[in-house]
Image (cartoon, coloured by chain):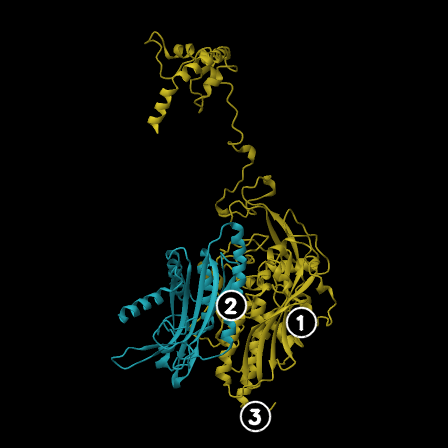
Chain colours: A cyan, B yellow
């Protein structure tokens, strides 16, 4: 399998290679029915963001800061026998739902294959001097590979509800294991640097800077971006 | 262990962090087994009162139990804090489901910064605990508790006892945090025999205990601490210091269906714990049960009832708990279990926790009164909870549960059993004050036709009923003379009335009379062979015709 590359620096070194940032990459795979895609994605993304969000920082004199409070709430899934906890922030929830909705629509319109992946990347901004633009340096990448299955009857759907629920329980345990490793996290920033590390645009919580992207796999089994790259390479080789 | 490396301030801070971490751990675990969805609010401006920057409410009794178990000690090597979650059926059988263990081992991390890194990692660990408590099998069981079983918790301190979990139990690690005095680990050991039974099976198959046989073994260590239901009415057996529901509180269900089935109302009154009340049940799934269970059943319906009662009552002096499902307009409304809640009807919580519903749930009734622990202050929670305990007054007797059958709207019941005030129908205030008896309902019993006057003077159109005159001519009335409306006798040789009388009973159509019908049928049958012969001759024409149609 080709080495994992961060979506924001596809030309850069592969993860783990010398020269790569400490970008750890985790991959989760799920097989779900079409109508379960959204809830399954939200469950995983919210669980990750629960661990990667803090309260709002309030900087005081002498470089000290205090941290706001993060509330949490239970979410029940409708199409999966599963419940998860998310951060109590409607803004964050809306942002995730929007991304997941786009992913789901793209999956649906891609044809009958139903394979794709959605990525949640945490990054830091490194300011560069003019004329260079700021760099985005990822430090953690979560990829969820999704395989959409079609089920024939209600009995299969019921089994799928339970099975996917159990699978998601396993995924949550996996996520928590990764979080518990206490590996690289960006240093707590000074006030002038806080926007390079955290997303301070939300009013009630403060997640690390993140971006969500997705890829749909075409029926040849290759991801669309890979195909494009190959085309360009081939063209240039002429 | 020598901790001269650790400054005394750091040591003090670390001890405090571990202590409050232990208390918050217990809160998260017990709250996750209440059978309800939890919701707390984020707050951007720090009040300085939320430990680990997380909004985790403190149920005072849980804190009390945890402190009692810890007895001033902290988790250390060989001394772990354990929260045992078990299930108890309506028949009184119980079974351990999970043991959550907060342990300390000797692996020290001297380099780590206490006030910063340890604190943040403890916060992260609590978030992991929030996530993991929803994925073990006991979570789904606890969401469905109430009618056939309840979930109980027990806190103990000392050696971990896993033998009650049966064979093949599994362990999940929530996480670890290294500190200069040792590494804190948090994990859960859970029974898996139940995992093979879906919760639906579990509810449907009594007796449950027959299937899993290994837990009947006597426990090597008898429980040193009492079990508590994971729903908050308990504590009465200790001579409650905690506020309980006030006298004769009637608790109403909040079902809003327009034609509800007979509803069950719990009237919670003070009563002696010893004598079981006569429990009236009526075609409901709720079983008649022993007292201990009925007490717990009532508690499962009354989550945080003290908080509910305490709405607006400043003299309770009691930290307000999270008002799960509380409706400010109806402080005594019942908070039902979650999505799959059973009898009695539960508040119409949308199953997907819609935003509006969640925000309602999240409304802190009294934001300043979380059982405040201030990391930055040197005060302890003791002062807060002590003051509340002091104000709570004398212990209450235990609760009994009486089931009263209430009749819903549109139920065909003798009215004398129901008054409008009791009808739990939506918009009851708009209902008519005087309920008419069925007998008076004109739609059920139409008024008798008037007998004396109208035929003699009558008009074609008798009172209100336009078609009745056709019926009237047959038997009951003899029309001597009548004046049809709109007719003028002296203009036409034949007036409307004459015309009407002549043509009132026309003869039957011949084709409708039976004799003629029978005759023609016989003729038809006879002529059939002839007709068939004709058709056969013209078959080709018919076929051609059919083809033109296609």
Residue B398 vs residue B463, the one in the foreground = B398
Q: Nearer the viewer, residue B411 or A78?
A: A78
- The CA distance from mark 2 to mark 1 is 24 Å
Spatial separation of the CA atoms under disc 3 and disc 1 = 36 Å
Q: Chain of mark 1?
A: B
Vertical position of residue B459 compared to residue A5: above or below: above
Residue B243 spot, x, y in % from top left? 61, 66
* SS assignment at label 1: loop
Establish whether labels 3 and 1 are both on one chain. Answer: yes
Name the spot of residue B202 as percent of width and height, x first: 63, 56
Picture quarter containing residue B20? bottom right
- Point out which mark residue B190 bears: none
Q: Position of residue A92 (x, y in %)?
A: 41, 67
Instruction: Say which mark, if any, is on residue A172.
Output: 2
- Residue picked out by circle 1: B162
Give the chain of mark 2.
A
Location of residue B162 with respect to B424 vertically, above or below = below
Which residue is farthest front?
A238
Q: Are the residues under marks 2 and 3 on the same chain?
A: no
- SS category of the residue bearing label 3: loop
Name the image quarter holding residue B271.
bottom right
Report the mark closest to the observer, 2 or 3. Answer: 2
**Crowd rating for badge 2 (residues with CA inside 10 Å; few <14, some 14–19, many 20+):** many
The residue beneath circle 3 is: B4
Examine the image and state in which quarter residue B388 appears: bottom right
Residue at 41% in and 11% down = B503
Q: CA distance from mark 2 to mark 3?
A: 40 Å
The chain letter under disc 3 is: B
Q: Position of residue A75 (x, y in %)?
A: 49, 62
Q: Is residue A135 visible?
A: yes
């Amino acid at each position: 399998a080709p080495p994992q590359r961060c979506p924001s620096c596809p030309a850069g070194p592969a993860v783990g290679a010398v020269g790569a940032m400490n970008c750890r990459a985790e991959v989760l795979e799920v097989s779900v029915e079409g109508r379960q895609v959204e809830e399954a994605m939200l469950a995983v993304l919210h669980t990750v963001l629960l661990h990667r969000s803090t309260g709002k920082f309030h900087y005081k004199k002498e470089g000290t800061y205090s941290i706001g409070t993060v509330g949490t709430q239970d979410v029940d899934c409708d199409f999966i026998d599963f419940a998860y906890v998310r951060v109590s922030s409607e803004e964050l929830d809306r942002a995730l739902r929007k991304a997941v909705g786009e992913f789901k629509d793209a999956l649906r319109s891609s044809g009958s294959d139903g394979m794709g992946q959605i990525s949640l990347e945490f990054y830091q901004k490194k300011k560069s001097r003019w004329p260079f633009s700021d760099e985005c340096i990822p430090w953690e990448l979560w990829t969820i590979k999704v395989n959409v299955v079609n089920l024939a009857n209600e009995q299969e759907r019921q089994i799928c509800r339970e099975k996917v629920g159990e699978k998601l329980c396993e995924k949550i345990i996996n996520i928590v294991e990764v979080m518990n490793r206490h590996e690289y996290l960006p240093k707590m920033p000074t006030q002038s640097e806080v926007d390079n590390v955290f997303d301070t645009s939300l009013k009630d919580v403060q997640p690390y800077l993140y971006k969500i992207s997705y890829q749909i796999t075409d029926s040849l089994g290759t991801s669309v971006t890979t195909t494009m790259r190959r085309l360009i390479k081939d063209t240039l080789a002429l | 262990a020598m901790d001269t490396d650790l400054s005394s301030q750091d040591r003090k801070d670390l001890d405090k962090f571990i202590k409050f971490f232990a208390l918050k751990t217990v809160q998260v675990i017990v709250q996750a087994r209440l059978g309800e969805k939890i919701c707390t609010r984020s707050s951007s401006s720090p009040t300085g009162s939320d430990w680990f920057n997380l909004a985790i409410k403190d149920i005072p009794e849980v804190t009390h139990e945890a402190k009692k178990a810890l007895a001033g000690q902290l988790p250390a090597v060989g001394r772990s804090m354990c929260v045992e979650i078990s299930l108890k059926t309506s028949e009184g059988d119980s079974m351990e489901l999970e043991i959550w263990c907060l342990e300390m081992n000797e692996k020290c991390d001297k380099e780590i910064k206490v006030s910063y890194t340890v604190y943040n990692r403890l916060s992260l660990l609590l978030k992991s605990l929030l996530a993991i408590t929803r994925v073990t099998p006991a979570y789904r069981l606890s969401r469905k508790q109430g009618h056939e079983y309840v979930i109980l918790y027990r806190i103990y301190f000392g050696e971990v006892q896993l033998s009650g979990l049966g064979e093949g139990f599994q362990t999940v690690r929530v996480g670890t945090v290294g500190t200069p005095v040792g590494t804190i680990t948090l994990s859960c050991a859970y029974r898996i025999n139940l995992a093979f039974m879906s919760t639906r099976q579990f509810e449907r198959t009594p007796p449950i205990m027959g299937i899993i046989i290994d837990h009947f073994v006597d426990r090597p260590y008898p429980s040193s601490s009492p079990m508590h239901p994971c729903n908050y009415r308990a504590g009465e057996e200790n001579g409650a210091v905690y506020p309980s529901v006030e006298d004769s509180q009637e608790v109403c269900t909040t079902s809003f269906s327009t034609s509800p089935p007979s509803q069950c109302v719990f009237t919670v009154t003070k009563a002696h714990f010893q004598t079981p009340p006569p429990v009236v049940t009526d075609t409901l799934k709720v079983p008649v049960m022993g007292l201990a269970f009925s007490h717990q059943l009532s508690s499962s319906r009354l989550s945080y009832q003290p908080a509910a009662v305490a709405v607006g009552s400043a003299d309770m002096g009691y930290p307000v708990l999270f008002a799960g499902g509380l409706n400010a307009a109806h402080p005594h409304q019942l908070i039902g279990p979650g999505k799959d809640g059973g009898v009695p009807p539960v508040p119409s919580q949308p199953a997907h926790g819609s935003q509006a519903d969640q925000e309602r749930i999240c409304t802190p009734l009294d934001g300043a009164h979380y059982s405040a622990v201030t990391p930055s202050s040197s005060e302890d929670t003791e002062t807060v909870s002590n003051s509340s305990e002091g104000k709570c007054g004398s212990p209450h007797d235990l609760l009994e549960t009486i089931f009263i059958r209430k009749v819903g709207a549109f139920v065909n019941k003798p009215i004398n059993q129901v008054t409008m005030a009791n009808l739990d129908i939506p918009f009851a205030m708009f209902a008519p004050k005087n309920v008419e008896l069925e007998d008076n309902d004109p739609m059920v019993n139409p008024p008798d036709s008037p007998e004396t006057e109208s035929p003699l003077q009558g008009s074609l159109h008798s009172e209100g009923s336009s078609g009745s005159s056709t019926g009237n001519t047959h038997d009951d009335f003899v029309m001597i003379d009548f004046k049809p409306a709109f007719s003028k006798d002296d203009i036409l040789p034949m007036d409307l009335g004459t015309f009407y009388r002549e043509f009132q009973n026309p003869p039957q159509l011949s084709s409708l009379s039976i004799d003629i019908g029978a005759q023609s049928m016989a003729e038809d049958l006879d002529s059939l062979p002839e007709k068939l012969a004709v058709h056969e001759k013209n078959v080709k024409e018919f076929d051609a015709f059919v083809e033109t149609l296609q």
